Amino acid sequence: MPPRTMKAIRLHEFGGPQVLRYDEVPVPVPAPGEVLVRVRAVGLNPPDWYVREGMPGIPDAFKPPFDLPLIPGTDISGVVEAVSDDVRGFAPGDEVMGLLRFPDLMQSGAYAEYVTAPASDLAPKPATVDHVHAAALPMSGLTAWQYLIEVGHEHPSPFQDAPHRPVALNDDMTVLVNGAGGGVGHLALQLAAWKGARVVAVASGAHERFLRDLGADAYIDYTEQRPEDVVRDVDVVLDTVGGPASRRFLPTLKRGGALYPVYFGEFDEEENARLGVTVTGTQVRANGAQLAELAALVDKGAVRVAVDSTYPLARARAAHERAAQGHLQGKIVLTVA
């Protein structure tokens, strides 16, 4: 039986990393269809600090409701402690990982010693990696997968009417990954290479050896060159940075090419049509079945998960401060004793 209380990081107010508090709280109870997981590691993601700050700049009409205090976090790796009576496929003692309830619930209580999770959001942890590396995979890996390989859902993007349909990658194609050193970028690079595509990685100079080791065929240090000035005839651009500056990658595409900004910016549909290119995106969603496919690739050695740094759960504030510095090489992970 799990204990009645646990340690967790909670937000009692919105603000900077200093608002993250290490509290004693009740252990959650799994509802029907859910599993109770003893957390061993927690992956950090941009939504964690967006919510911590209160999502500034987002109109109130588009903000999901947040009831304070809340326990942040969505990505976990751990061990099944208990399952609801209707759950099949998982049992106490199983090692699992998952992106929990995202985006229906922007923060799912992962910064804690225990968390409840819908069984459908979980996948077996890759056998060849530890909990730290497994916790670094879910949101970033599923984002790369749903942008480049298979969406796996029919939910519309909040930023566009057109559905996102990934181009079927093959060895005749070139894929450019912007922000290739980060959580999504380094995994997307490997998925494109797994499909046989030639991969152009864009990042700062400090990441070159790391990204070439992961399979990048060409490398552009954005502090030395602008990729839009030197690259042409690309089939797919995955811009993990996205936002208003994402339009700068349009000249790199061949006719019939596609630009996928992870954070959607402002685009002119008439310009896209004139250039003969497609610009679409999607909203990453929890998906245990897709995560199991990613786990299989990790176990085969086709995908490696990089960890930028680790911090104990009690030092979540320091982990968020590291995230604010930027230039990550892989993911930041919290460890839970």
Image (cartoon, rainbow, N blue to C red):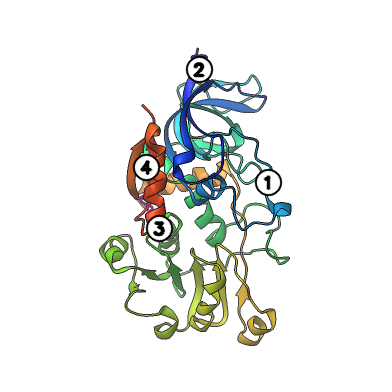
In the picture of the structure, the residue carrying the numbered disc 1 is 64
Q: How many marks?
A: 4
Q: Is residue 243 left or right of residue 194?
A: right
User: x and y percent of residue 314 in the render?
Assistant: 39, 32
Crowdedness near tag 2: few (<14), some (14–19) or many (≥20) residues, C-alpha within 10 Å: few
Residue situated in front as seen by the camera: 157 or 13: 13
Q: Nearer the viewer, mark 3 or mark 2?
A: 2
Question: SS for tag 1?
Answer: loop
User: x and y percent of residue 316 in the render?
Assistant: 41, 38
Give the residue type that dot 1 points to. Pro
Residue 5, numbered label: 2
Could you say which quadrant of the image residue 269 lies in?
bottom right
Crowdedness near tag 3: few (<14), some (14–19) or many (≥20) residues, C-alpha within 10 Å: many
Question: Mark 2 or mark 4: which comes first in sequence?
Answer: 2
Crowdedness near tag 1: few (<14), some (14–19) or many (≥20) residues, C-alpha within 10 Å: few
Give the residue type that dot 2 points to. Thr
Residue at 70% across / 65% down in the picture? 160
Give the residue type that dot 3 points to. Gly
Question: Mark 3 or mark 2: which comes first in sequence?
Answer: 2
Question: Mark 3 or mark 4: which comes first in sequence?
Answer: 3
Could you say which quadrant of the image residue 275 lies in?
bottom right
Give the residue type that dot 4 points to. Ala
- Looking at the rendering, the stretch of residues picked out in magenta corresponds to 302-306
In the picture of the structure, the residue carrying the numbered disc 4 is 318
Residue situated in front as seen by the camera: 38 or 65: 65
Cα–Cα gap, marks 3 and 2: 35 Å
